[in-house]
Amino acid sequence: MTRLASGGRIDRSRPLRFTFDALPHTGFAGDTLASALLANGVRVVSQSVTYGRLRGIFSAGVEEPNALVQVGGGTGSEPMLRATQVELYDGLVAESLNARGRLSPEPDVARYDKLFAHCDVLVVGGGSTGLAAALAAGKAGARVILADEQAEVGGTFLGGRDLIDGRPATDWLAEVATDLAALPEVRVLSRATAVGYYDQNCVLIAQRRTAHLGPAAPAAMARQRLWQVRAKQVVLATGAHERPMVFAENDRPGIMLAGAVRTYVNRYGVVPGHRAVIFTNNDSAYACAIDLDDAGLDVPAVVDVRPNPAGGWPDRVRERGIEVLAGQVVSDTAGGNRGLESVWAGQRIDCDLLCVSGGFNPAVHLFTQSQGRLRYDETLACFVPDEATQAVAVAGAANGTFGLRDCIQEGLAAGAAAASAVGFGDGHPAGAPQVETVAEHPIVPFWLVPDESGATQFVDLERDVTVADVRRAVGAGMQSVEHVKRYTTIGTGSDQGKTAGINSAAIVGALLGQPVAAIGTTTFRPPYVPVSFALFAGRTRGQLFDPARVTPIHPWHVAHGAVFENVGQWKRPWYFPHDGETMEQAVLRECRAVREGVAAMDVSTLGKIDIQGTDALRFLNRIYTNAYDTLAVGHCRYGLMCKADGMVFDDGVVMHVGPDRYLATTTSGGAAAVLDWMEEWLQTEWPDFRVRLTSVSDQWATVAVAGPRSREVLRALAPAMAADAVSFPFMAIREGMVAGIPARVCRISFSGELAFEINVASWYGLRLWEAVMAAGEPFGITPYGTEAMHVLRAEKGYAIIGQDTDGTVTPQDLGMSWVVSKKKDFIGRRSHRRADTARPDRMHLVGLLPVEPEDLLPEGAQLILEPRQEPPVAIVGHVTSSYRSAALGRTFALALVKGGRDRMASQVYAPLPDRLHPATVTEPIFYDKEGLVRDG
Amino acid sequence: MLLIPCPWCGQRDEIEFRYGGAAHVEYPADPETVDDATWARYLFVRPNPKGPLAERWCHSQGCRRWFNIVRDTVTHQIMRSYRMEEAP
């Protein structure tokens, strides 16, 4: 055991059992998985991704590159967590990972939530700086959110042994936490990592709420919560990440960041070894030597690259009899299957722990995401924040301010200034507490121990990239650190190179003979830590992401075995197969029923827009390509609309239902877009029009009754309604009782047959449908679906907008000049005269009859003119609709073909994988060209 | 993600809005009398400045009103928000 008998912030009265790679262990409440593993003497936690080298816990935080674990089993299993961030709970099950986690094959049943929040000051980071900033801003009266990634606030100094006002720093911490809790406008978020910083001070925070509770997590509580915070001012107190040293064999278990070792000793009461050497270029690691010495470890030497380390920290270490090897480096290490056994620093030193510190990189990730600029500070040997572009201040270690006293002062000042900027307080913080400081000997930047091969000098531990790889990249001509990153994969692991990035830039610089300042950093992209997709999705899953819309008649369709297809968000019956029937057989039967008897279809999904006002007619004349002046009340008319570029956008039927009142139908998928389009013109171009638009798509249910015997069915349903061809002509509207329900009946046909569309209030929809089916039974009424509807309309050459058109097709291309007014202006009219729109060789809608009558061309098939061509083969068009026709006894298709109307009776070919399929170009109408059956 | 001031509803999150492109693109008073180049400019040519841009938005998940804002395309700062009938 390497657990100290006392000390640390763990609760020794609450032991917790857990397993790692199936072996049982025990830790304490307050442990992370990493600290508990170290306490149990687990030194090897993974094998590296490329070389299979043994790796141990390297850090104590978010930057961990080695200790990736899979936690939990079954559906709650979480892949790719860092052991340094997993809080221990009783019964925790963890497995080591070789660079890649495993997603559970089962859907995640946990709940993930989102929360939008606003505040005056957002403080990111709950270390000494962030606590001071939140306190100062909160005391000034500002509404403050403090987001801290750990289970308890305190940050790095939980792992230190500083004194504040002569007492342990943790006492001060407890006081500040109490003060903050007493401020009603201050909210402290724990286990909350700010992962992205976006425009207008929008910061995304991922909060873990139940994972630390393990099986005891309340089921009703969201597992994680995504905070989208809008802050008037942001204070970034995100701290700094310690840099590793780069030397040969620097990846053995037992080689750890010096600051992390301090955290394990002081916060968790764990010593990760027995005999420790320190390797550093700065003073901070000397504190580590002292902590380890106090904990009873052998500390034979501090290896310091600086030629003359002097002053407070080195003297204190020397006083303890610890040798300081000045101007020396660790150039190699040796070890076995438990990791480190000795290091070479001009002499062999036996040790099982090597604490390294190459200085600190301010955690500027969020600052650069906010579009802030960085500069390289020569004195501090790191990149620090420079110019900000948003209302953001950076304080403490994140700003290159490393001493505890200075961090607290800077935090207080930043918090007070941020509050003052939004009108709270005078910007002057309360006095800072007294903190003992030691004069520091300056850091000497040191990036790379000279080594000929570099093959075991690891730069990026997670991605297993070495100095040799960087050398190869530079040798191949890469000069930009972004190129080297992509060539070597440095920084592309799930840790995003938090310990590797700056070192790699400096090494590239060293190889190119340029200073690191000239090389710069790679881009720090969000998210700062990996975030699960489930959290981004939140509750917006399944029906709440993409709801399915159903009509009031839907239950009948389900009960009668309909096969559904998706039309936009609608579920529409595709066809109604009888027992043992194929789709082809069912559709042919349904088509035959429409052509020869009577059939019914649920067309409630059509979009419906109520248009009212004294300018309604003027409005319709501008929106639609055709004119409505002559449309009398009680009649309806087919209408087509174009975008301003002259291309067909949508179509439908406009009913004149009363004085200054119309009801326009749209395609099922286009309802929302058409209403938006109409509103846009009304509000932006014609604000003087007195017109109001209301969506009534869901308010009306509509049943189409089609076929030569449909009139008989209507008569049975509505004996009082005169339904003969003279009394109820084509495109007329009648209102009256149908099956005892107030209804509006239109004589509209989308199949060419005699047909009636019966509209009732939607809550009567199912009753109407059942009445239609009952009244039609003596006539053999057949329910039909969208596929039969498609076949029937295609036989008549009626284009479906969005299937036979694609946003590049004009009404003229469709052969529908008859619906384009020559007398009035409408949206898109001018475009029909543009040179490109008036070209004779545009794509025209034509019919195709495959030469072999059983040959069904696939929709989307490309068409060519000549069967034998040298590549490149010229494409002249494509098939847009293709069906088997009961009425024709053969297959047929619609197609868009270049200059198609000039190619009547000529042949085109569809080159399909098996062979060329020849087809004859025809008029796009195949059935009842003269319109003889319309009146039944 | 922007916070957009709807002149009718106040500050709302961008997800509630639909973008409508550049504002003040004038529809020719009589499209029939303009030449092809002028019409093509109306259809296809839009300003793309680095800096302030007047643009239209629709509060489609809220009051469904169209309005204009002036937004700096570099900083995303929104300098002004005004109703359709207000002068640019």
Image (cartoon, grey):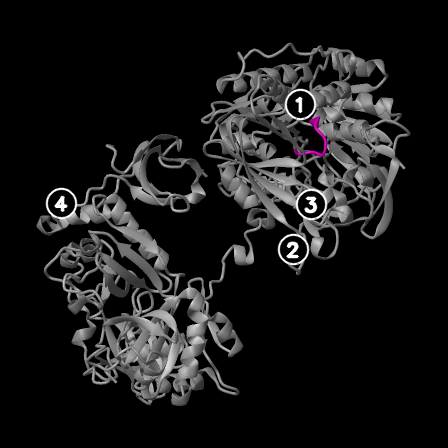
Q: Residue A108 got which mark?
A: 2
Please tell me whether mark 3 sits on a helix, a strand or a loop.
strand
Q: Would residue A820 be counted in the magenta stretch?
A: no
Residue A799 position by quadrant: bottom left
Residue A685 position by quadrant: top left
Q: Would residue A154 be counted in the magenta stretch?
A: yes
Q: CA gap, disc 4 to disc 1?
A: 63 Å
Please tell me whether mark 4 sits on a helix, a strand or a loop.
loop
User: Tag 2: residue type?
Assistant: Asp
Q: Which residue is mark 3?
A: A81
Instruction: Please provide percent x and percent y for residue A828.
Output: 20, 56
Please tell me whether mark 1 sits on a helix, a strand or a loop.
helix
Residue extending farthest to the left is B33
Q: Nearer the viewer, mark 2 or mark 4?
A: 4
Q: CA gap, disc 3 to disc 4?
A: 63 Å
Q: CA gap, disc 1 to disc 2?
A: 36 Å
- Local crowd size for mark 3, using a 10 Å CA cut-off: few (<14), some (14–19), many (≥20): many
Answer with left or right where residue A183 lies relative to residue A30.
Answer: left
Q: Which residue is mark 1?
A: A180
Q: Considering only vertical position in the picture, is A397 above or below A63?
A: above
Q: CA gap, disc 2 to disc 4?
A: 58 Å
Q: Which residues are magenta?
A: A149-155
- Local crowd size for mark 4, using a 10 Å CA cut-off: few (<14), some (14–19), many (≥20): few
